[in-house]
Image (spheres, helix red, strand yellow):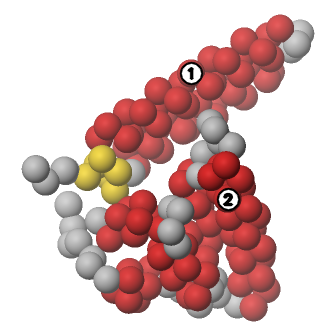
Amino acid sequence: MGEVLESIDEIIEKYSKKPTPLWKGLYVSIGCVFIVFAIIGIWIPGWPTVSWAVPAAYLFSISNERLFRWTLTNRWFGSSLFDYYATGKTLPKHVKNLILIIITVMSIFSIWVTTLAGDPGYGQAFIIIVWVIGIYWVNWRINTRNLIQ
C-alpha cells in the first residue's frame, strides 16, 4: 500500500487536474447529477449515498477544485471520501466483499426480471457482461486497505 495522505490540501494537490473549459463544464454537470443522487440517498433507505458521491468526487477532482474540496469535507459523506482518497483510493476487505455480494445479487435479480419480461436472452447476456466487468473492477482494480488494529 502507498502513502497515506493526512490533509485535504495533500489530497487536492495529488488528485486535482485542470481540463479544458468544455470538459470542465461537462464533468461538473455530471458530477452535480451524481451529487443530487447521493443526497437523495441520505433520506431514502436502500438508495446508496457514497456510491454516487465517489464518481462525483472523481469528476470534481478533474474539473473543479472547490467542489472536490466540498465533497471531501461535507458532513454527510465527506469522511468516507476523505478516507478513500487519503489511503490511495483503497477499500477495506469487508467493504469490497459487500460490494461484490450486492453486485451479484442485483445482477441475478435483473436477469430474473429480464427473463420474466420475455427477453430472448440478449438482455440477460448484457447483464452478465456488466456483472463480470463489475466483479473484475472491484475485486482486482481497486486496492484493498489493510485495517490497522
At which x and y percent is residue 23?
73, 81
| Mark 2, residue position | 39
- Drawn side of residue 29 relative to residue 68, left or right: right
At which x and y percent is residue 124?
73, 19
Q: Which residue does the image show at 37% across and 41% down from the upper left?
A: 95
Quarter assignment of residue 57: bottom right
| Position above or below: 5 against 83 | below
Question: Which of disc 2 and disc 1 is earlier in sequence?
Answer: 2
At which x and y percent is residue 142?
39, 51
| Mark 1, residue position | 105
At which x and y percent is residue 89?
37, 62
> Foreground residue, 109 or 119?
109
Q: Which label sits in the foreground, 1 or 2?
A: 2
Using the rendered image of the protein, determine whether residue 14 is visible from the camera's viewpoint.
Answer: no
Identify the residue at the far right of this view: 118
Residue type at mark 1? Val
| Position above or below: 119 against 107 | above
Q: Which residue does the image show at 56% across and 21% down from the upper left?
A: 105
- In the rendered picture of this protein, how many numbered marks are placed on residues? 2
Q: Which residue does the image show at 32% across and 71% down from the upper left?
A: 86
Q: Which residue does the image show at 69% across and 27% down from the upper left?
A: 127
